[in-house]
Amino acid sequence: MRAFRLALAAGGLALGAVAYRIQIDHVHSPWQRAAATVAIGWVFLGTGLFAWARRPGNRVGFLMIAAGYALLLRQLRYRDEAILFTVFFAIGDLWYVLVGHAALAYPSGHVRGRTEHALVRVGYAAVLILPLAVLLFYNGSRPLLFFHLNAPKSLLLVDADDHVVTVLQKTLIAVYAVIGAAFIALVARKLVLATPRARRMLLPLTIAAVAIALRALFECVRTFFSTSVANDYLFWWQIVALLTLPIALLAGLLRARLARASVGDLVVSLERTPTYALRDALARTLGDETLQLAFWLPERGVYVDADGRRVDLPATRDRTVTPLEHDGRRIAALIHDPSLEDEPQLVDAAGAAARLALENARLNAEVTAQLTAVKESRARIVAAGDRERRRIERDIHDGAQQRLVALALELRGAQRRLGLREDEGAGAVLTAAVSELQIAVEELRELARGVHPTILSEAGLGGALEALADRTPLVVAIDDATRGRMPPEVEATAYFVACEALANVVKHARATRATIGAERRNGLLVLGISDDGVGGARPIEGSGLHGLADRVEALGGQLTIETAAGGGTQVRAEIPCAS
C-alpha cells in the first residue's frame, strides 16, 4: 500500500508539471494562474495521501486524492488532440463534485442524510450528462464559452449545431450554480442546527461553501459578463479558498488522532484529579463541555450522577449515550455530543484511561446515593410523624375533648335542677365532677397542644410562637421576621425546637427573660432561642434537644447550642425552608 501511495504521489507530480505546461502553452495563462491551478491539485493530492495513510478506513482522504487528480487531468482537455479533448471534456468537471463530496463526507467519511445523498447524486449526474450533451453537437468551428479558445472537433459529434452548443453550455453553468447554491444552503443549515462542538468541526464545510460559491460566481461572470476585473478578483479569492479547504479537511481528520494522543495526559492528570472533577477532565479530553457522566448502580438498577441523583439516559437525537464497561460489568455511561460518534476510538481510549477512576467514582456515587436515600427517608419519616400528630390532635379535639365538654355541660344542667330541690349532697358531688371534667379538658388541651398545636396550622409559626410565649411563666420576647408561611414540616420542627428550648429554660436555667427570634436568610429559616439564665446546658443523648437535633438534620438543617456558665444559653436552628 505504501508503494501504491508513492506511485500516486509521483504520478501527481508528473501530471502537475504537464498541466502547468498546458496552461502556459495552450491556454496562454499567466504563469501565476497556471502555478495556482497546479498548486490546488497538488495540495488536494498531498493532503489526501497523508490523510489516507493516517486514517485508511476514512473515505475523505481518497476523495481528496481523486479531486486532486481530477483537477490536474482536467487540463488535458486543452490539448489539440481530439481524443484528449473529448475524454477530458466529458469527465473534466468531476473535480467539482469530488470536492463537494469530500466536504459532505467529512469527518466520518460517509455522506449522511437523504438530502446530502440526493445532492451528491444530482451533482455526479450533472457533470457527466451535460458535458456529454455538449460533445454531441460540437464540431470545433467556434470557441466554447468557458474555453475562450478553439478546441478540436468532438469525436462524439452527432449533429453540428453551434446554437445548441451555446444553449447547453449556458444551461450547464446555470445548473452548476443551482447545485452550488443548494450545497451552500445545506452547509448553512447544518451549521445552524449543529451543536457547538460539531460547529467547530464543520469549519471545512464553511470553507468548501465559500470556495464553491466563488467558483460558481466566477464561471457565471466569465460566461455571461466577461468582466476582467471581476474575473481577477474572483479567481484569486477562489484559489485561496480552494487551497485552504484540503488543509482544513486534513486538520479536522487528524484532530481526533491528536486528541487520542492527549489521552496519555488524561491518565497522568487523573492521578491528582479528585473524583468530583472527573467529568471535567473527560470533557476537556473529548472536547465536549456538555458531557455528562452517569454511574451505574446495579443494586438499584439505575444511573446516578456524582451527587447520587437519578439520571435518565436521553433518547433524543441531539444527545448520544456511550456505555462504559469493566470486565463485562457496566460501570458508567457518557452522555455526549453526537459528533463524537465519528470518533469512537477517542471515546473508547478516554473511557479505558479513566476506568479505574470511574470505578472509584461509581462507588462514591453509590455511597452518596445511599446517603441521599437515607436523608430522604428521614425527611419522609418527619413528615409522616407530623401528619400523624395533626391527626391525633384532631381526634383529641373533635373526639374525647368534645365529649368531655358536652358531659360537663350536662352535669351543670343537672346541678342546676338539683339545686332547686335543695339536695346539698348530690350538688356537692356534681360540683366536684364538673371540676374534675374541667381539669381533664384542660389536660387534653395541653396534650393536644403538645402533639400539634391547632394555632400552628391556622396562624403559622409566628402565631404559634406568640401563643407559646403567653403560656410560658416568664417574660418571652418574640422577634418574628419570617413573613409568610413555610412548609408544614419546617414550621412544626421550628415550633417544637422553641417549645423544648423554653421548657429547659423554665426547668433549669433560673432565667428571668427569654427571647425568640425567627427570620428567613438565604433559603434558611434561622430560629434562635436565648435566655439570661445560669447557662451550662448540653444536649445529653436521649434528651429532648438531642432528639430535636435529629429532626432538624432530617430536614437538611443544623441545631447548635452555645452556652457558658453564668452567661445564659442560645439554641440556634437553621432549617432549609424553600417551598
Image (cartoon, rainbow, N blue to C red):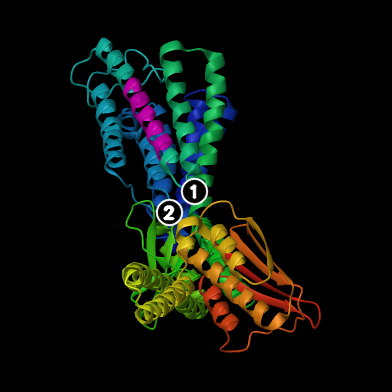
- Location of residue 152 in the rendering, given as x and y in whole percent from the top left corner: 33, 22
The amino acid on which the numbered mark 1 sits, given as a three-letter code, is Met
Q: Quadrant of the N terminus?
A: bottom left
> Residue 313 in the image: x percent, y percent?
36, 63
Q: Earlier in the sequence, mark 2 or mark 1?
A: 1
Vertical comparison of 153 with 252: above or below:
above
Residue 571 placement: quadrant: bottom right
Instruction: Work out whether residue 158 can be spotted.
Output: yes
Q: Residue at x 43, y 32 (%)?
A: 75
Q: Quadrant of residue 546?
A: bottom right
Disc assigned to residue 242: none
Disc 2 target residue? 339
**Image height check: is 37 above or below 328?**
above
| Residue 61, horizontal then vertical, whole percent | 43, 52
Foreground of the two, 395 or 91: 395
Q: Is residue 425 left or right of residue 282?
A: left
User: Which residue extends farthest front?
Assistant: 422
Confirm whether the magenta stretch covers residue 261.
no
Determine the residue positioned at 59% across, 61% down.
466
Q: Residues within 10 Å of mark 2 (few under 14, many from 20)?
A: many
Q: What is the span of residues highlighted in magenta in the rendered image?
A: 173-190
Using residue 328 as the reference point, say whether residue 135 is left or right of it. Answer: left
From the image, tell me which residue sits under label 1.
201
Image location of residue 80, percent across then percent down? 38, 26
**Spatial separation of the CA atoms under disc 2 and disc 1:** 8 Å
Please name whichever residue, 433 or 522, is drawn nearer the observer in this view of the structure.
433
